[in-house]
Structure formats: C-alpha cells, structure tokens
Amino acid sequence: MKIDGKDWRTIWLERDGQSVGIIDQTQLPHRFVTARLATLADAAHAIKSMQVRGAPLIGAAAAYGLWLALREDASDDSLERAYAALLATRPTAINLKWALDEMLAAVRNRPRGERVAAALARAGAIAEEDVAINKAIGRHGLPLIEAIAARKNGGRVNVLTHCNAGWLATVDWGTATAPIYMAHDKGLPVHVFADETRPRNQGAALTAWELGHHGVPHTVIADNTGGHLMQHGLVDLVVVGTDRVTAHGDVCNKIGTYLKALAAHDNKVPFYVALPSPTIDFTVSDGVAEIPIEQRAPDEVACISGKTRDGRIESVQLVPDGSPVANYAFDVTPARLVTGLITERGVLKAERAALAAAFPERSA
Ligand code: MRU
C-alpha cells in the first residue's frame, strides 16, 4: 500500500541481498522508522518485541529469520535451533508455525550447499503468496460492502474493526482491510470505526495510521464503544482478522474481539472474520480449551506511551504503584457468533464441513 504516494510493503529483501528490511511498528504512529534484520537473533527479537506483528507478517518474518539463520550456519543442528528459537517468540498466531514448517519442508532434504538459496526462495514465495491471498480476500469481501452500500442507497457504510488486521499486519493489503481498501478505491463511501485496542493500541496507532495514509475515512473509538454504536444502528458490519481459526471455525483474535462478537450478535450486526488459509489450524477443535493465549508483560497494561505536546514520545504509568495487572493478549470467539469467514477461496460458514471442503489439502 502507499505511504505518501510511495509503495511500501511491511517486509522486504534488502538491496544487499543479505538482510531483510522491515517497518519498525513499535515506532508508529508518531515516527516512521525502518529496521534491518541481518541475523536469526534480529528476526526473533523483531517478532518478540512486536517490531513486526500480525499473524501473517509474523509468519513471513519467521520464514526470513530461518533463511538468516541458515546463512550463518546451514547445518541440521542450526536448522533445528533456529526453528525452535523462532517458534518460541509468540505462541498464539499459528501462521508462525505454518511458515516455519513450510521452510523446513523446503530445505530439510537438500544438501547444505543448496539450503540458503532454497530458504530464500521459499521465504520470498511465502511473502508473495500472502499478498495474493489478501487480494483474493479483498475480492471476496468486497461484495459484502457493495451490498450494504446498495441497500443504503449510497449512504455511508460503517465497518467496525478491532486491533490491526490491516496491511501492517500482513505483507500487503491486510486481511480485514483488503475489502475496505478495495471498496474505497472503487469510490464506495466506506467509513471505519477503529477500536483503540488496549493494551498496545494497535487500532489507535496502526489501523488509524494506515487508513489515514490511504485516505480511508475513519474514527478511532475507545474499546468499550462498539456496543453502544451497534445499539444505535451506527455499525453495518464488523470485520476483524484472526491469529488462529480452529477446524470448527472458532476464532482466536486480539483480546476484546469476543465482546464485539457478543454485541454484534445481540444487535444482529453481521460479524465477519477475514483470514488467509495458513491461519486455519485443523489440529485444533475447541478454540477456548485448546488455543494457547499469550500473556504479555504487565507494563503494557500498567503504562501507556504517546506523544507529548512538545513532540517527545513518553511512557506514563496509569495504575497505582503496586497494583497487580493481567495482560491476556487474545481471546476466542466461538464459531456460533461468526456470520462468515472471508477467505481467499470465498466466504465460508464457520463450520468444519465448509472449511474442509474449501481447503481439502490442509484438512487432510
Ligand atoms: O498482537 P498482534 O498485534 O500481533 O495481534 C494482531 C491481531 O490480533 C490481528 O488482528 C491478527 O493477527 C490478524 S492480522 C491480519
């Protein structure tokens, strides 16, 4: 997508052919900074510290991370260590494991001398596939917005989204945002309510930033606002991303998604989830019982950072000294609350049969 007229992706092979470039998302929205990953340690740190985040981008970054590890040492031992180190960076988004397994399959049975080139080719392909998948998600999701626009006779289509499932969370286009960008680019009057998404504020910081740079009308709302807006008919459609979808269509996504799904259900607002197929985990049936929920540092809840009036970035403490805090990063929305899953192969029911029929090669 574009930033000030220039095309960007979130991750790229640097011109030196030996390192990987990323947008450092911990600096957004107040500073646009890129960073260079040259080693396995750089890649693992970038994922863990959330310089790169969002399920599909985590997968692509891990793939390049494995390539960087093999550049240092292409032995079996190094491959195993790099796989384990990258897998341990974040537990919830299944795209991480998917991408690492793809990389392993691409290099494991090759002689050492061929592994580096094979790893780079597969990592590059994973990044390209993500872009193509997200464009397809956009094409399948667009008619949902078009139908509402037609029903409203050209009136504004209000889409509520949670966290950042935009192009910053992927290699390009985003998942939940792909239909939104396509609708906007077609001239449809689409407007986005972006949940701020405490504790790390991916909605306020990242979704608002990328929508703003593309010119999509949007409004940032405090996390607890969605239910009120839905009761007053101000939300036509909810579209969120996801970090893992079970074989039965349960959806794990950023903490707070479940409450939005409940509010949408109560108010008969359609609740859609946009996902690339690598986000489906056919090994898991019951999302609430089985998906590991990341618990992050207490400071993310206890403190908040932002720009002071004189332009400095500062972090301040919100809670009393000594108050314990809990920081659950994700929750699970049961399939029964999901209107549909927008995938690269069409809009599916959140049911095992529909997922298995659309992705037989993954479900087997
Ligand atoms: O903790 P994050 O910022 O990595 O969480 C991201 C989300 O929860 C996104 O909504 C999800 O990964 C879908 S991204 C296309």
Image (cartoon, rainbow, N blue to C red):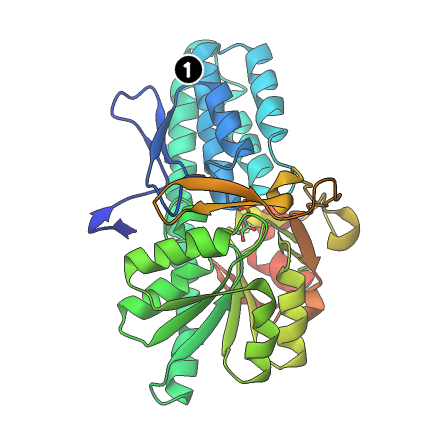
Classify mark 1: residues with Cα within 10 Å, few (<14), some (14-19) or many (20+). few
Q: Give whichever of 254, 285 is nearer the camera.
A: 254
13 on left or right of 250: left
Residue 216 position (above or below residue 330): below
Q: Give whichever of 235, 347 is nearer the camera.
A: 235
Q: Secondary structure at mark 1?
A: helix
Residue extending furthest toward the left: 5
Residue 296 in the image, given as x and y percentages of width and height: 65, 39
Write down the quadrant of residue 316 in the picture. top right
What residue is drawn where x is 51% and y is 77%? Answer: 235
What residue is drawn where x is 58% and y is 63%? Answer: 223
Residue 314 in the image, given as x and y percentages of width and height: 46, 40
Residue 273 in the image, given as x and y percentages of width and height: 55, 62
**Residue at label 1?**
114
Residue 56 position (above or below residue 37): below
Q: How many marks?
A: 1
197 on left or right of 322: left
Residue 112 visible in rendering? yes
Residue 66 position (above or below residue 304): above
Residue 179 in the image, given as x and y percentages of width and height: 40, 65
355 on left or right of 142: right
Residue 93 visible in rendering? no
Write down the quadrant of residue 264 in the picture. bottom right
- Which amino acid, by three-letter code, is at mark 1? Glu
